């Protein structure tokens, strides 16, 4: 049980004290067992009975909890606890920021945390990215969730916050060992519909938004810019093939590929085969790596399941949809996307998906023991020369000047071959140097982006201009 303490200050105040009794944080175990999933034949779906997320929703029940799933919300897979993690809500759809976990071993839901109660009374535009208790404000999470196995943490960035709907650069981690949220380094830019993917080879997360591709290192708590291209973001998801070190970015009419091992720019995914069009045109489809067959597997709704082979010169999609003997009707996609709620569970060699808080959880098996697809042998990556990524230091002195005053920008790099200025200045710049800016009239931000054979990086610095003394 927990208390909601009354207060009346500001627009977020509530007038009456309410005693709330938390619902059971675990759902009733269904009659099926995990062996049912393990023995599921290839090409078959399975619906877990009595597996609605609403069974573990907070009490008193708020029907808006359905938007934990349907309001542009994503998920990820916790390989440590063998669980699908779902977190979402946000904007004008749901105030709660509780975390839900569906365990593959027990086949039942658990609510891992309670919601931050005062958030439900936020008036429009008053919500912040981080609540006063240090937890994240509820958000449309899109594809901004990842599981960090080395940290045993749920990682999130970006999203459309409750109640304002604003995008955010706020990045946080929920440690499953301590059950605590912690803020980490903000992303380079505030975002809404961002997609991300964890790379087990580097231990880092790659995040794509509006043409920008960033890499976040949990070990150093730093962001770096990998590349930047044309702006596409809405309804796009990302996943990484760790063997071929390729990141696929796809959905809503777009399909791209990024070579993690060799860097460079984001290229069009010129894939052929069954499902190429369906996956590219689906709105935020499901996409995750299947280690049993060594391929990414996508779900575009209903019985449409496709595997992407990246081993050859031409990326190829192949149809791995349900076979004729399958009798379970697969779920329809949510109108607002699947994002990361389609995940591969290695322990049962099956995909798990949920597309409604009031719907059952489904599993789908692509291959099982000598099933319909022969697992792809794991190739040995060709050793490549180690090319260090460029580094950049940019500063302004002074950072605050009176109107009409001047400041000097100073920068230096390592492993960079070219630099370009943007923001309040522009043009090509040397890889190191300084520039004095005079007669400044308004506050501005100065950005410098530098590239090299090992990638690219970007930094910004701001100068505040105050009124001249009278």
Image (cartoon, rainbow, N blue to C red):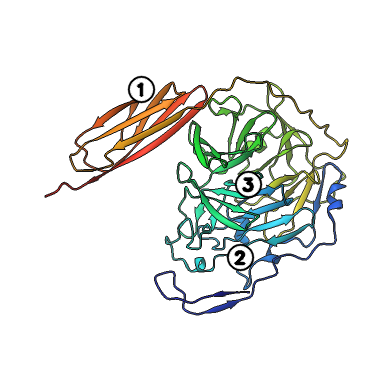
Q: Nearer the viewer, mark 1 or mark 3?
A: 3
- For the residues bearing labels 1 and 3, Cβ distance under 8 angstroms: no
Task: Identify the residue position indicated by label 2 in the image.
Answer: 114
* Image vertical order of residue 136 relative to residue 388, above or below: below
- For the residues bearing labels 2 and 1, Cβ distance under 8 angstroms: no
Q: Quadrant of residue 434 in the image?
A: top left
Q: Which image quarter holds the N terminus?
A: bottom right
**Residue 307 location (% of width, % of height):** 73, 35
Mark found first going from the N terminus, 3 or 2: 2
Q: Nearer the viewer, mark 3 or mark 2?
A: 3
Residue at (25, 30) in percent of width and height:
436
* Image vertical order of residue 414 relative to residue 87, above or below: above
Mark found first going from the N terminus, 1 or 3: 3
Residue at (54, 60) in percent of width and height:
93
The reply to whether residue 211 is visible in this rendering is: no
Residue at (42, 76) in percent of width and height:
8
**Nearest the eye: 380 or 47:** 380
From the viewer's perspective, tell me whether residue 215 is left or right of residue 31: left
Q: Quadrant of residue 322 in the image?
A: top right
From the viewer's perspective, tell me whether residue 84 is left or right of residue 74: right
Give the spatial CA distance, label 1 vs label 3: 39 Å
Mark found first going from the N terminus, 2 or 1: 2
Q: Which mark is residue 151?
A: 3
**Mark 2, other Cα within 10 Å: few <14 / some 14–19 / many ≥20:** some
**Residue 51 location (% of width, % of height):** 75, 60
Secondary structure of the residue carrying numbered label 3: loop
**Mark 3, other Cα within 10 Å: few <14 / some 14–19 / many ≥20:** some
From the viewer's perspective, tell me whether residue 441 is left or right of residue 195: left
Secondary structure of the residue carrying numbered label 2: loop
**Residue 186 location (% of width, % of height):** 48, 46
Task: Identify the residue position indicated by label 1 in the image.
Answer: 430
């Amino acid at each position: 049980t927990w208390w909601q303490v009354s207060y009346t200050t500001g627009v977020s105040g509530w007038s009456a004290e309410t005693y709330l009794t938390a619902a059971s944080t675990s759902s009733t175990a269904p009659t099926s067992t995990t062996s049912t999933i393990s023995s599921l034949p290839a090409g078959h779906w399975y619906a877990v009975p009595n597996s609605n997320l609403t069974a573990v929703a907070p009490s008193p029940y708020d029907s808006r909890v359905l938007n934990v799933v349907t309001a542009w919300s994503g998920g990820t897979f916790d390989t440590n606890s063998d669980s699908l993690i779902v977190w979402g809500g946000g904007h004008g759809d749901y105030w709660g920021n509780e975390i839900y976990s569906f365990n593959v071993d027990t086949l039942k839901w658990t609510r891992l945390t309670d919601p931050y109660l005062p958030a439900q009374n936020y008036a429009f535009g008053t919500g912040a990215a981080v609540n006063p208790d240090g937890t994240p404000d509820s958000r449309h999470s899109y594809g901004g969730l990842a599981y960090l196995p080395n940290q045993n943490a749920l990682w999130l960035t970006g999203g459309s916050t409750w109640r304002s709907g604003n995008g955010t650069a706020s990045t946080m981690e929920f440690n499953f060992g301590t059950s605590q949220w912690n803020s980490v380094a903000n992303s380079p830019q505030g975002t809404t519909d961002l997609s991300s993917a964890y790379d087990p080879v580097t231990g880092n997360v790659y995040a794509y938004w509006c043409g920008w591709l960033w890499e976040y290192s949990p070990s150093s708590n730093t962001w770096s810019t990998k590349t930047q291209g044309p702006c596409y973001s809405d309804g796009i998801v990302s996943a990484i093939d760790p063997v071929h070190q390729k990141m696929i970015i796809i959905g809503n009419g777009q399909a791209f590929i990024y070579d993690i091992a060799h860097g460079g720019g984001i290229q069009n995914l010129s894939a052929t085969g069954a499902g190429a069009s369906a996956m590219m045109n689906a709105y935020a489809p499901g996409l995750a790596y299947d280690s049993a067959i060594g391929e990414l597997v996508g779900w575009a709704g209903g019985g449409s399941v496709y595997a992407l082979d990246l081993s050859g010169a031409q990326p190829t999609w192949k149809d791995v949809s349900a076979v004729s003997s399958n009798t379970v009707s697969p779920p329809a996609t949510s109108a607002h996307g699947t994002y990361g709620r389609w995940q591969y569970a290695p322990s049962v060699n099956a995909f798990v998906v949920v597309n409604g808080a009031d719907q059952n959880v489904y599993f789908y098996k692509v291959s099982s023991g000598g099933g319909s697809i022969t697992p792809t042998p794991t190739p040995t990556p060709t050793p490549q020369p180690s090319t260090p990524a460029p580094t950049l230091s940019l500063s302004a002195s002074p950072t605050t000047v009176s109107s009409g005053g001047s400041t000097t920008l100073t920068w230096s790099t390592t492993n960079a071959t070219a630099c370009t200025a943007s923001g309040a200045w522009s043009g090509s710049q040397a890889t190191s140097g300084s520039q004095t800016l005079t007669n400044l009239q308004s506050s501005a931000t100065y950005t410098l982006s530098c590239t090299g054979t090992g990638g690219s990086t970007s930094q910004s610095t701001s100068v505040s201009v105050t009124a001249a003394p009278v």
